[in-house]
Amino acid sequence: MICEVFPNAEITSFDDGDKAWDALTKQSPDLFIFDDEHPGIRGREIVRRLVNRKAQLPMIFATGACEEVLPPIHEFNIKVLQKPFHHEELLKVIRQLGIRNPN
């Protein structure tokens, strides 16, 4: 979906939290979009680690969870995007984080 919103962006995706964390420790992306439910390190743990490192990384937490079960992300500078969502909603949140189209 993000490829459709920003067709010229370089996108890297991971199906495992451990792989995502390993990549985040070696590179500095412009944006981190994550979910909490996947194999390996959970999304909320990755966020905790990034915050502990004082990372200034814009983040979007894409979730199907209801508000009551969300991790305490209000402590961090993270936008929440409820799944399912449309391109327009993703684009709005990305722009709220100050990310502009790399075209």
Image (cartoon, rainbow, N blue to C red):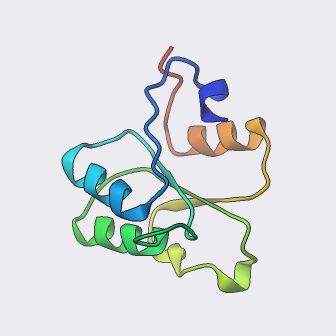
Quick check: 95 above or below 73?
A: above
* Position in image of residue 4 (x %, y %): 67, 25
Quick check: 14 above or below 62?
A: above
* Position in image of residue 41 (x %, y %): 40, 71
Quick check: 92 above or below 103?
A: below
User: Does residue 80 appear left or right of residue 17 in this picture?
Assistant: right
User: Does residue 59 appear left or right of residue 46 in this picture?
Assistant: right
Residue 95 picture quarter? top right
**The furthest residue to the bottom:** 68
Residue 69 picture quarter? bottom right
Which is nearer the eye, 73 or 33? Answer: 33
Quick check: 9 above or below 92?
A: above
* Position in image of residue 52 (x %, y %): 25, 72
Which is nearer the eye, 46 or 90? Answer: 46
* Position in image of residue 32 (x %, y %): 45, 49
Which is nearer the eye, 6 or 22? Answer: 22
User: Does residue 24 appear left or right of residue 44 in this picture?
Assistant: left
Q: Across the whole image, how many numbered discs are drawn on residues?
A: 0
Quarter of the image where the N terminus is located: top right
Q: Residue at x 35, y 63 (%)?
A: 18
Q: Residue at x 24, y 43 (%)?
A: 27
Q: Residue at x 53, y 81 (%)?
A: 72
Q: Residue at x 62, y 79 (%)?
A: 70
